[in-house]
Amino acid sequence: MWPPAACLLAPMRRLAALLAIALTACATTSRLDAANDVHGLLVAIRDDNQTAFDRYVDRPALKRQIEARLVSETRSSDATDALKALGIALARPAAAVASAALVQPYAFRTVAESYGYAPDQPIPGRVAIAGALKYLPDGRVCATEHKGGDCILMFANEGGTWRLTGFEGDLSDLHERLSAAK
């Protein structure tokens, strides 16, 4: 005869607690692993190092994201259906031009500076960067504006390197840097 349900409750709670600890440990390990590469990207941005920047950036993913944002904004605009159709048709070539211009170290300088990567400041450590990262259920991590805040930079582990795959921040941050670079 099976023991009463009350006898099973305590072991089930312990098992649930252990599973929660294990999942938290996996998320922390991912954040710490990602912190090294996020740090590398932010230093590359600060130093305007194109070669190092390219190592930590997934350009095709960013281009796809720019295209998706253009399509989304076009669909939600007040434009006529004909203009919306034109905007959607031009989203892919516009994304190619925008990604070539915007996916550059200087364009992300404001973002890097917001994480403490300004030329006149000491470089933050790995643990500080890990604290700004949030583990996402799909295995990616994101850098947040502040602890528990919205995601700004999205990273995915691609072959052992955490690479920038998305930018959810204010596009004016990138536009200001692009204008200043001209």
Image (cartoon, grey):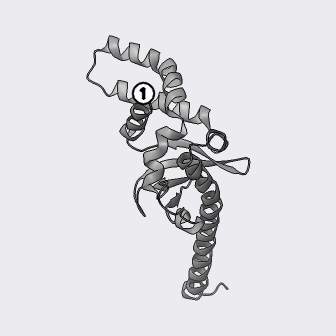
Q: Who's the residue at 36% across and 38% down the image?
A: 172
Rendering coords of residue 160 (x, y %): 73, 51
The residue located at (54%, 40%) in the rendering is: 105
* Relative image position of residue 137 (x, y in whole percent): 55, 55
Q: Which amino acid does label 1 sit on?
A: Leu
In the figure, 28 relative to 98: above or below? below
Residue drawn at x 60%, y 82% is 14
The residue furthest top is 82
Q: Residue furthest left?
A: 78
Number of disc labels: 1
Classify residue 78 by image quadrant. Answer: top left
Q: Position of residue 124 (x, y in %)?
A: 53, 64
Q: Which residue is drawn at 57% across and 72% down?
A: 20
Image quarter where the C terminus lies is top left
Mark 1 highlights which residue?
A: 70
How many other residues sit within 10 Å of disc 1, few (<14), some (14-19) or many (≥20)?
Answer: some
Of 36 and 4, which appears nearest the observer?
36
Q: Where's the N terminus, which quadrant?
A: bottom right
Q: Depth check: 159 or 174 in front?
A: 174
Nearer-the-camera pick, 54 or 75: 54
Q: Where is residue 68 in the image (x, y as percent from the top left)?
A: 47, 30
Give the answer, above or below, for where 68 lies relative to 168: above
Q: Is residue 90 above or below residue 165?
A: above
**Horizontal side, residue 108 vs residue 156: left or right:** left
Most extreme residue toward the right is 159
Query: Residue 52 lies in what quarter of the image?
Result: top right
Secondary structure category for the residue under label 1: helix
